[in-house]
Amino acid sequence: MISRALLIVVGAALLFPVSALAQDNNFFAGFDLSAGWASGSSSTTNGGAAFAGGGVVNNVHFDKTIGLGGHVGYKLDSALSAFISYQHVRGGVSWDANFPLIGAVSDFRGHAISNAIMGNLGYDWALSDLTSIEASIGLGLSINSLSNIVETDGPTGLFLSDVADHSRISPAAQIGIGLQHKITAHLALGLNAAIGYTGGFETGDTRSGNLGITSITPYGIDHVWRASIGASVKLEL
């Protein structure tokens, strides 16, 4: 629900300037696709049901990520620009939790999804009339969600529970660099690379499975960093 609402707000923000301000050729808009990698850690030492004595999270692993984004902005001068960006990134995530009190280990796997909106500054270095290098830096917020988390028994792989989904808001930041080449007077294609910080993730506080529906202390993933490469299309209005 949060992601859908965010998409509606961002879509309106992206579309309104394009339609209302298209007469000013300093405005631009674009879309991008990316693939990348993510890493994070966990400080959770008491996750799961209370009777199990507290699960210690280890071995946090992210699968490869895919991303889709868009941006609208304004050229402040021939080199400097300001723009608002939205990016949706998703990928698989897994971790295990050790419960020393009962001598058990559980494995967890599901999806990690981020919806980030940021304000950015970009700077272009012209290599020729048609080709340029652009560097950018952005700050904003990311809605981070863990969904479809399934808990299985570590030694046997048997199903134990479905862990409730949850979303949280974290600060986000990104730096990027890219190569752009104009194929028409108003349309450019780009190759981009970026490194970003998206904050943390957390599960919900219930599980449903072998013990029915029970309350748990959420499992958390902290300090998630992402690196990505991608392609973009930019339209100068």
Image: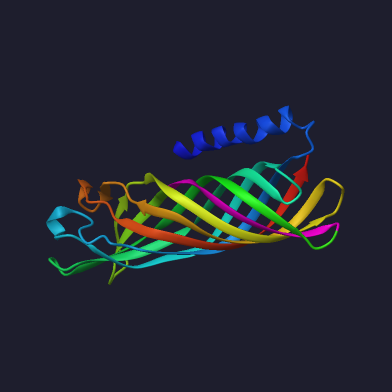
Number of numbered discs overlaid on the protein picture: 0
Q: How is the image coloured?
A: rainbow
Which of 103 and 195 lies nearest the eye of the viewer? 195
Rendered location of residue 89, percent (x, y)? 53, 52
Rendered location of residue 230, percent (x, y)? 65, 60
> Position of 167 compared to 56: left or right?
right
Magenta region: which residues? Answer: 129-144
Rendered location of residue 24, percent (x, y)? 78, 33
Q: Is residue 189 above or below residue 23?
A: below
Q: Toward which corner of the image does residue 119 lie, by quadrant?
A: top right
Quarter holding the C terminus is: top right
> Position of 233 compared to 224: left or right?
right
> Position of 224 compared to 44: left or right?
right
Which of 60 and 195 lies nearest the eye of the viewer? 195
Quarter holding the N terminus is: top left
The residue furthest front is: 77
Q: Toward which corner of the image does residue 60 lie, by quadrant?
A: bottom left
> Position of 49 compared to 87: left or right?
left
Residue drawn at (37%, 53%), measured in percent from left and top?
Answer: 201
Whether the magenta-drawn stretch holds residue 143 is answered as yes
Whether the magenta-drawn stretch holds residue 88 is answered as no
The residue furthest top is: 20
Which of 87 and 57 lies nearest the eye of the viewer? 87
Q: Is residue 108 above or below residue 114?
A: below
Q: Main secondary structure of the magenta part?
A: strand
Which of 79 and 143 lies nearest the eye of the viewer? 79
Rendered location of residue 170, percent (x, y)? 41, 48
Residue drawn at (86%, 57%), measured in percent from left and top?
Answer: 129
